Every structure is written in C-alpha cells, then in structure tokens.
Image (tube, coloured by chain):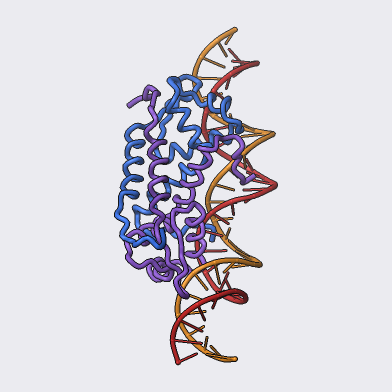
Chain colours: A blue, B purple, C orange, D red
Amino acid sequence: MGTTKTQVFTDKQNELANILKVLGHPARLAILEQIANQDECICNDFVLKIDLAQATISQHLKELKKIEIIQGTISGKKMSYCINQKKWNEVQTIINQFFKQDIKTKSCSN
Amino acid sequence: MGTTKTQVFTDKQNELANILKVLGHPARLAILEQIANQDECICNDFVLKIDLAQATISQHLKELKKIEIIQGTISGKKMSYCINQKKWNEVQTIINQFFKQDIKTKSCSN
DNA sequence: ATTTATTATCGCAATATTACGATATTGAGT
DNA sequence: ACTCAATATCGTAATATTGCGATAATAAAT
C-alpha cells in the first residue's frame, strides 16, 4: 500500500494525474513563476528567494524536469533553467481538455 | 519534516497547489469524470466501476468534497454526488491564470 | 424489531513525500 | 594543483498518502 493502483486507470488519467501531482506543490509553483518571470534563470536564484534548503530546491527542480515542463542547460558552473514552452502549452491543453468535458449531471441542489 | 513549508509561500501558491494536489490522483480524476458523465450520481456506482475498495473511494470523495469541486446530498440511504459547477469553473480559471502568465525567460536552447 | 443496503469512519500497514545536513561532483579562477 | 562556487546526490527523519478490512451509522424494506 501507499502506492497508487495505476493499473486500474486509463493512461490519460494516470498521465494527467502525474502532471497535476508534480504541479501540486507550492514550492514547484513558486519555482515555475520565478523561471517564467526572470530573464536570467539560474538555480541559485531560487535558493536566495525561496526559503528552502538548496538540496530541497534541487529536488523540486528534478521533479519539474521529469515532466519536462522545465529544462536545464549547463552554462559554466551554473545551471540555466527555462520553461519548456512546448510542454507548458501542452500541459495547459491537457488540463483544459479535462475541464471542458460536458457535465451531464443534474446538479444536486444549487 | 514530510510537511510542506506553507509559510514560505504565498496564499495563492498554497491554494492552487492544494487544488492541484487533490486533482493529482487518477482515482479522483476518474471519479470526477464519472460524476460529470452520469445523469444519476450515486456513490456506489464508483465502487462498481472503479476497482478500488469502497473505503478507498469514500476517502477520495472526501478529498474532492474538501476542495468543494463536488458536493453530495443524501437521498434516502444513497448519496448523490454532483459537480459543483461554480467551483469547477473557478478551478479552471485559477489554473488558466497561472498558465497565462508571461514567460519572459529567453529559452535556453530550443 | 430485524434485516439489508449504502456510505462513512477507524485503525493499520506499506509506501511516498518533504525537507535537510552532509557529502560528492564539476568547472572557473588562481 | 588548489580553492571556491554552484549544483546534484545520498542518507535519514518526520510526516503524509494510499489502500483496505473491519466496523459503525443510518435509512429503507420486510
């Protein structure tokens, strides 16, 4: 237990859930906002602006890289992170597709 | 540890993260899809269609109720769940607002 | 009143997540 | 070669999540 029973769900459901799970942490949202709003994107910036240990930030960056919403390139001894625009838009689309589904249920009360 | 350091982030970040976290589980997405696509919305339906124990489904329903994206009304001995349209739209808006932010970062490579 | 059906809750085990200090690793500058 | 700076990884502790069986709780049907 403690493990999600992925076999029970569709690939789409698992995929979207995984994306939303990664996005579902304030530190990772904060990181995305900072990357999006900064011309220069250097990992250390996050350490300075977000009050979490460097190791913790690094871990969160790893998760964001895993779903490919950000990408990092090495520039000298620094890491340069940026938004992966293509994936960013893709994620937005997938989420909107989910929310655009028709709601056929008669509302219970309101 | 194991606890998210919410004090470090803005209310908006914490709020959105919390919503995304709840949505970030395939069972809960599956439940939402089923509620949305069914005229009659009875909890037991999920137990029959999703291969998870009744206790587990009940727990997931509780999480979804907590963010108010669904609401349940008792009708006899059955529970009737439905989408909370207002909140559903609100969630969609909040997510889209996040994704609509300008991305100022020069892309690293692509 | 007793049974049955439906759902919620409790308690627990297994696993995952969050966070951090300590320690690599790697590249730049000296 | 040595040091410093930037980042990643390891190991670990605390807590959270997932899932389930067992057990309440409640309402309908008999």
Task: Examine the rendered structure and indicate whether residue D3 appears above or below residue B45.
Answer: above
Task: Examine the rendered structure and indicate whether residue A88 appears above or below residue B106.
Answer: below
Q: Nearer the viewer, residue B39 or A67?
A: B39
Please report the residue visible at 48 percent of the width from the left and 61 percent of the height from the top.
B61
C27 to the left or right of A51: left
Residue D9, given in percent of the width and then of the height, sits at 54, 37
Please report the residue visible at 44 percent of the width from the left and 51 percent of the height from the top.
B23
Residue B25, given in percent of the width and then of the height, sits at 45, 53
Q: Nearer the viewer, residue B24 or B68?
A: B68
* Res. B36 image quadrant: bottom left
Q: Nearer the viewer, residue B46 or A54?
A: B46
> Looking at the image, which residue sits at the far front?
A110
Please report the residue visible at 54 percent of the width from the left and 58 percent of the height from the top.
A2
Residue B101 is at least partly visible in this image: yes
Q: Quadrant of the N terminus of chain B?
A: top right
Q: Quadrant of the C terminus of chain B?
A: top left
Q: How many marks?
A: 0
Please report the residue visible at 36 percent of the width from the left and 45 percent of the height from the top.
A95
Residue A26, given in percent of the width and then of the height, sits at 52, 39
Residue C26, given in percent of the width and then of the height, sits at 51, 25
Residue A7 is at least partly visible in this image: no
A99 to the left or right of A62: left
